[in-house]
Image (spheres, rainbow, N blue to C red):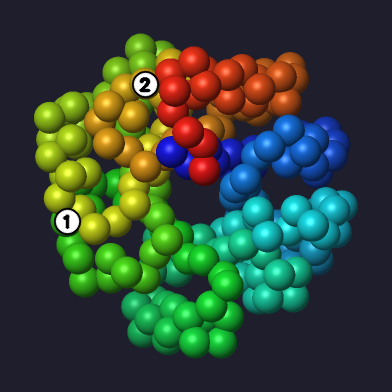
Amino acid sequence: MKLIIISSSVHIENEAQIVTKLFEAGLETFHLRKLAWSTQKMKEFINQIPEHFHDRIFIHSHHNLADKFKLGGIHLTSTHKKRKLQTWLMIKWIKLKLPHIKITTSFKTIGNLLDTEHAYDYSYVFLSPVFDSVLSKFQSGFTEHSLHSALNKTKLNVIARGGVDITSIEKANKTNFKGLAFYSSIWKTKDPVTEFNKIVEKFQDLSISIE
């Protein structure tokens, strides 16, 4: 399964340094989601991270920086996808000119997962919100049966997002998710790196390999 961390949406002191430590601890995929940031601020953040980790970063905005910094990929938000022709052309251009850059997006319904029109455009997709962050149960609208059925039928690699914490790992694996995206459970702790290490240990305890 993929283990992904999404950046905090609020200011975190020394966040770039923390992200670097997460990479050093083994994190393979980091989504830099700072939709209010300027291009310059994004550049400054990425420049604080050692170059050999840049291919593990996916950005949700200022996509032109993906080629400049040789990043791992770009994430298309709902705003991007509303511009259908522009998005379609961008995907085609990236796949032709920048084949090393992966493309991801987000969905909010099971129905989206069964729409195969653009299934091969994306390396993986987020489905959210999947879990109740308080009860560690599936959110209203999602049942284990419906999710398991959809995840077995879809051609997409689906990552669980929303309410994901260390207690979600076993359930997500049994339901056939291809990975989990951690957010609050990382950034609301006093030590994100220690929490990440606990998550890795949990994967190991459950004999689930991490991508």
Q: Of marks 2 and 1, which one's residue comes earlier in the chain? A: 1
Q: Position of residue 50 (x, y in %)?
A: 85, 53
Q: Is residue 172 visible?
A: yes
Position of the N terminus by quadrant:
top left
Distance from disc 2 to disc 1, alpha carbons, whole Å, reads 24 Å
Tell me if residue 164 comes above or below residue 180 in the rendering: above
Q: Position of residue 92 (x, y in %)?
A: 43, 84
SS of the residue at dot 2? helix
Question: Amino acid type of disc 1?
Answer: Leu
Q: Closest to the observer: 128 or 159? A: 159
In the rendered view, tell whether residue 151 sits above or below residue 200: below
Dividing the picture into quarters, in which one does residue 42 lie? bottom right
Query: What residue sits right under mark 1 in the picture?
Result: 114
Q: Nearer the viewer, residue 194 or 39?
A: 194
Please tell me whether residue 58 is drawn above or below residue 8 in the rendered image. below
Give residue 107's position: percent from left, percent from top: 32, 51
Which amino acid, mark 2? Glu
Residue 63, image x, y percentages = 61, 71
Indicate the secondary structure of the residue bearing disc 1: loop
Mark 1: few/some/many CA within 10 Å (<14, 14-19, 20+):
some
Answer left or right for 47 relative to 37. right
Q: Nearer the viewer, residue 39 or 18?
A: 18
What residue is shown at x 20% (from left), y 53% (from top)? Answer: 154
| Residue at the image position 27 percent from the left and 27 percent from the top | 174
Question: Which residue corresponds to the image point at 34% horizontal and 29% vertical from the top-left?
Answer: 172
Residue 170's disc is 2
Instruction: Pick out the residue farthest to the top.
Output: 135
Quarter of image, res 200: top right
